[in-house]
Image (cartoon, coloured by chain):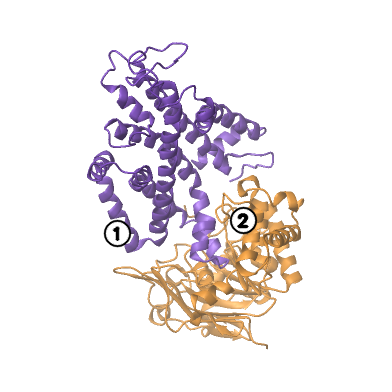
Chain colours: A orange, B purple
Amino acid sequence: MSEPLLSVGDLRTYFHDAETIARAVDGVSFDVTRGEIVAVVGESGSGKSVTALSVLRLIRKPGRIEQGSRIFFEGREILDLSETEMRDIRGNRIAMIFQEPMSALNPVLTVGEQIAEVVRVHTDASRHDAWERAVEMLALTGMSDPRERATAYPHQLSGGMRQRVMIAMALVLKPALLIADEPTTALDVTIQAQILELLQKLQEQLGMAVLLITHDLGVVAEIADRVVVMYGGEVVERATVTELFGAPQHPYTEGLMNAMPRLNQQTERLSTIPGIVPPSTAWPNGCRFRDRCSYAWEKCEMEHPPLYTIDGNHESRCHLAVEPERRESSHEPIAARGQVHR
Amino acid sequence: MRSSIRESVAAEPIGGRAHWTRHVIRHAGIAGGVLALIVVVALLAPLISPYDPIAQPDIIGLKNAAPSLIHPFGTDSFSRDVLSRCIYGARVSLSVAALATAIAVILGTLYGAIAGYAGGVIDAVMMRLVDAALAIPRVLLLIAILALWNGLPLWLLIVVLGATGWFGLSRMVRAQVLSLRELDFIAAARAVGATSPRILIRHILPNVVPTIIVAATLGIGHVIILEAGLSYLGLGVQPPSASWGSIIQDGADQVGSAWWISLFPGLLIVTTAIACNALGDALHAAFDPRQITGASTEIDS
């Protein structure tokens, strides 16, 4: 296997305040190879967005990427770069699109100016050339009438068009890696599908890798090659998308799957995973998921599970991997209880 | 604020641009027209002015003449034509106000933007200094300064007026920058590799423009009044130059008998100040692109 484009190793991003340390990301490792789509899945508070921001080194105080973390990108250790070298990478080699396209666009600049701005920050292109590239890029995102649209202000565009603008802004310099933080969450369903299709199309066209942050397994199934499931600031399962959906190993992944609506399933109510993610200032001992897990036994409290290799590239951070018989004996599988919270 | 805009958009989804244009024209039209007239008169003073403003044609016969067709605003105690003096006085009053406000706006914006963007200790120290400066009444401060340096040249008067007028604006700018820098689009700007100065100038300051515009137009009105007050006290514009304020002062001790000397420059000051305020409000609306709504506007979320 060739050297990965991005290699995150033992990433720990902590937020320090006077009394407590919030360990938002606590030892996360994963690789992204050129041209593939890797999804990072998890619910709110699992640390996936902080992971994304850490890769770009956009963590602001009191947050800090701890010593010993490694983020290797295009043969360079990102954490050793100077701020100037880092700025050179942002928007140029690694681009990011944000969840809420309304607030991530500057309300007083036209969208064309904002896309051209990226070009002007990183290249010597003239004002005119940068503008032309912006229009070109808007056309590439399937925006009709791009020349006209480029002169619009963000509020004059619909949510879907704004997200196209964000994508144009991110991809105008043809980055090697695109980090998409919940790119479709703020959009309605029909637009979501269009945006995903567009992302996939551009990903193939430009041959870039995508790190897709999402909580939506539907999105994952649709476009991802590999999946990293995060819980409690850790990776709890890592697999290809086929393996993950075929045989989810970690009870948390299982719960997420059961919480997905399905057409061929006759249920009155969607199941949920009981409870919430514990606060990152106080992760429980042992397995961080055990309070919400119906399989949990003594070992889960005593011993923090490592990432067990299931087979090949499939890994799971659950003691069930070494004691599979417990899965059968458990009377009720997690999240099939039909509980509705709220 | 955003929600109120949403509502107004919702109320009038089509033809929003026309509505906006009407709104701005209605308010800016009158105020801007009045101000433009005063500015044009000031610029063309030598052509328009019926008499030489400092000529004293007949200090005995034409002393304190009431308004008439020959002297519409009357004459003062030196037989000078009050209308001509007001026309030339407009030059002094307006340029002092405009330049002093420009200085104040530049200082206030820079200071506030740096404090707000830097945050932390720098912000705290810079803002405590402004608090201290704001605790001293501006008029008293000016009287003290001007009394110490007797007979200040005009340009120094402008600098002093500007240098004492930016504290409030710097607080407003700082507060806005403080909230702006937390917004997603600033994070997005950082994520595309923009440097801090670039983020400040290109992404943050344009968002502060409405505040600056309003502060500047209100400031001009305020400085005109302030300068008039100082000149009235004999501390502002020094003879032979005359601002509206010093003309009022010329007539101050004979308001009972020759009311016209003080009344007309007073009316001009009031008119100009009101026009500045009204224009400030109209520009505030015009400079905020969120108020421009077009056919492509969609109401979502």
**Residue located 52% across and 70% down the image:** A252
Residue located beneath label 2 in the image: A267
Residues beneath discs 2 and 1 located on the same chain: no
Q: How many marks?
A: 2
Left or right, A306 with respect to A239, comes to: left
Left or right, A129 with respect to B188, comes to: right
Residue furthest out toward the bottom: A1
Left or right, B116 with respect to A314, comes to: left
Chain label for disc 2: A
Residue A266 visible in the picture:
no
Tell me residue A235's x, y (percent): 52, 76
Mark 2: few, some, or many residues within 10 Å (few <14, many ≥20)? few
Q: CA distance from mark 2 to mark 1?
A: 62 Å
Is A116 situated above or below B225? Answer: below
Tell me residue B235's x, y (percent): 28, 37
Tell me residue B41's x, y (percent): 52, 28
Chain label for disc 1: B
Could you tell me which secondary element the residue under label 1 belongs to? helix
Tell me residue A46's x, y (percent): 48, 68
Could you tell me which secondary element the residue under label 2 belongs to? loop
Residue located beneath label 1 in the image: B125
Q: Quadrant of residue A238?
A: bottom right
Q: Quadrant of residue A277?
A: bottom left
Instruction: Find out whether the residues at labels 2 and 1 contact each other: C-beta distance under 8 Å.
Output: no
Mark 1: few, some, or many residues within 10 Å (few <14, many ≥20)? few
Tag 2: residue type?
Thr
